[in-house]
């Protein structure tokens, strides 16, 4: 048995706790590296995307009393777009342009599998988010002060 164990991959030899911790550390590092290509998104950038999306999809939205926050704007062409889940997932606005085409029709992930990342494409006002959020501080920008 011991001879077989040394030839087995490291992940198989780890307990579930060790595997989860190992993969969480790897995922956090991947996210940190990817976010070097980004900057915090502005309220106006999200409002621009939302207005374009809402013009095509006026029904399926999620209203929030929270203000816009915790979203990124992709500034440089990344080598990859990581698949991340749970607390390590992120929301990113992807501008139009040449590298946007490399991400279509489906983002390139480090590995196949599920991802909780929300991607907002400015080039065609689409998203993979289940239901885009209309934040409290975005409403007045789009619909006037009576909706704020």
Image (cartoon, rainbow, N blue to C red):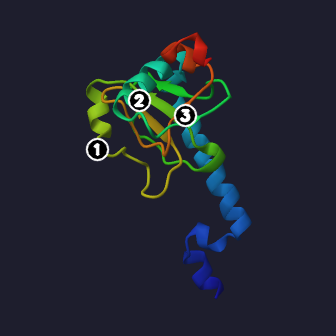
x and y percentages locating residue 132 in the rendered image: 50, 36
Which mark's residue is nearer the viewer, 1 or 2?
Answer: 2
| Residue 96 appears anywhere in the view | yes
Q: Residues within 10 Å of mark 2 (few under 14, many from 20)?
A: some
Quick one: SS at disc 1? loop
Quick one: SS at disc 3? strand
Residue that badge 2 annotates: 54
Q: Nearer the viewer, residue 93 or 17?
A: 93
x and y percentages locating residue 47 in the rendered image: 48, 20
For the C terminus, the quadrant is: top right
Q: First in sequence: mark 1 or mark 3?
A: 1
Q: Quadrant of residue 67?
A: top right
- Please give the name of the residue rendered at 56% of the width and 20% of the height, measured from the top-left corner: 139
x and y percentages locating residue 66 in the rendered image: 68, 28
Residue that badge 1 annotates: 105
Residue that badge 3 annotates: 133
In screen coordinates, is 48 left or right of 105? right
- Please give the name of the residue rendered at 31% of the width and 31% of the height, measured from the top-left corner: 100
Q: Residue furthest toward the right?
A: 17
- Please give the name of the residue rendered at 32% of the width and 39% of the height, measured from the top-left corner: 103
Q: Residue 118 bears which disc, if any?
A: none
Q: First in sequence: mark 1 or mark 2?
A: 2
Which mark's residue is nearer the viewer, 1 or 3?
Answer: 3
In screen coordinates, is 5 left or right of 46? right
Q: Residues within 10 Å of mark 3 (few under 14, many from 20)?
A: some
x and y percentages locating residue 51 in the rendered image: 42, 23
């Amino acid at each position: 048995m011991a001879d077989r164990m040394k030839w087995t991959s490291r992940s198989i030899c780890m307990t579930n706790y060790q595997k989860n911790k190992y993969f969480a550390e790897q995922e956090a590092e991947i996210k940190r590296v990817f976010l070097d290509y980004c900057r915090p998104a502005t309220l106006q950038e999200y409002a621009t995307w939302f207005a374009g999306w809402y013009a095509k999809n006026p029904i399926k939205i999620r209203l929030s009393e929270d203000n816009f926050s915790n979203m990124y704007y992709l500034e440089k062409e990344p080598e990859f777009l990581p698949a991340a889940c749970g607390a390590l997932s992120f929301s990113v606005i992807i501008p139009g342009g040449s590298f946007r085409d490399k991400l279509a029709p489906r983002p390139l992930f480090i590995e196949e599998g599920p991802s909780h990342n929300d991607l907002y494409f400015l080039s065609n006002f689409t998203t993979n988010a289940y239901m885009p959020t209309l934040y409290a501080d975005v409403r007045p920008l789009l619909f006037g002060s009576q909706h704020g």
